[in-house]
Image (cartoon, grey):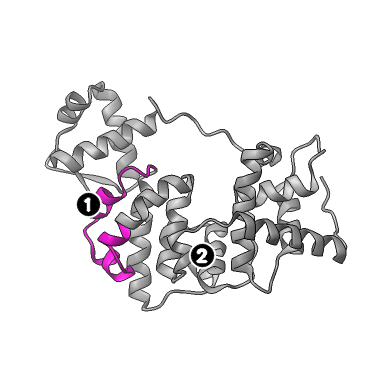
Amino acid sequence: MNKIRLTSKQIEQFQNTVLKQGEKLYREMPWREDTNPYNVLLSEIMLQQTQVSRVLLKYEEFKSAFPTLQALAEADFQEVLSHWSGLGYNRRARFLHETAKMLVAQKSFPDDADSLQKCPGIGENTAAAIVVYAFNKPLTFLETNVRTVLIYSFFQEADEKIDEHVLKDLAEQTLYVKNPRKWYWALMDYGTYLKKTEGNFNRKSTKHTIQSKFEGSFRQKRAATLRCLLKNGPMTIDELAETQGFEAALMVEIVDTLKKDSLVTEVNNRIIIQ
């Protein structure tokens, strides 16, 4: 699908609609009430592939344990992982911990997306989102709710999938540069509302994927293994397999992937949180 060019009137109408919906649907969140860079970083990493409702339950607990970027950087990773437990995708905890150490070593929090992308686990869209929310700079990024609003507003009748570059171009054209932070909050809240009331328009995006079920999945077994290590301390692979009720071969595979993600290591034939 080719890019479309909006008139100034179309852009103004779209912005007015989104901003009005944003005011009506605004959701209070702690990282919106206090947009310091650490709060924004923490929330954006937590929100990757995780619903807001689940993040809200863990955010305050995590902030209580690690109130500052420095406190997080200086913490032992096992403690970080224990407070992360329940959010899933545990390698994000490793990425977040390593990012905190990098930023503290730099003695400043970068306000540009290019610098943030050098941190582990921070891609193009996450970096731009952090800069927008923490520093109110007008950058363009795409995520599920942004795509939902754009597709609902401009491609409702489209039969073919909408390419990412087409949506990115529309996002750039319509960006409300006077207050980008407020703009993206409005897009997020409006997008959430549309998914509940109008259906999942994001399915028309070429980026749309169906997330596999967690229950009974390999991801669940990985998470259970980490919880077992957090609870019981270092264990052999055979002990882990017996405790979890897994075949030894499966436990070897699980441990190998956890090693690859720098979540565990092996010392004297015992698996420990790294």
**Mark 1 Cα-neighbour bin, 10 Å: few <14, some 14–19, many ≥20:** some
Q: Is residue 161 in view?
A: yes
Residue 255 rendering spot, x and y as whole percentages: 28, 36
Q: Please tell me whether residue 235 belongs to the stretch shown in magenta.
A: no
Task: Work out whether mark 2 precedes mark 1 in sequence or the reverse, and give the earlier one.
Answer: 1
Identified at 71% across, 56% down, the residue is 168
Instruction: Work out whether residue 119 can be spotted.
Output: no
Q: Is residue 117 left or right of residue 55?
A: right
Q: Quadrant of residue 182?
A: bottom right
Q: Residue at x 60, y 73 (%)?
A: 137
- Residue 48 horizontal/vertical position (percent): 48, 49
Which numbered circle lies on residue 78? 1
Q: Quadrant of the N terminus?
A: top right
Instruction: Out of 244 and 248, give the one closest to the viewer.
Output: 244
Q: Residue 130: which numbered mark, if any?
A: 2
Mark 1 residue element: helix
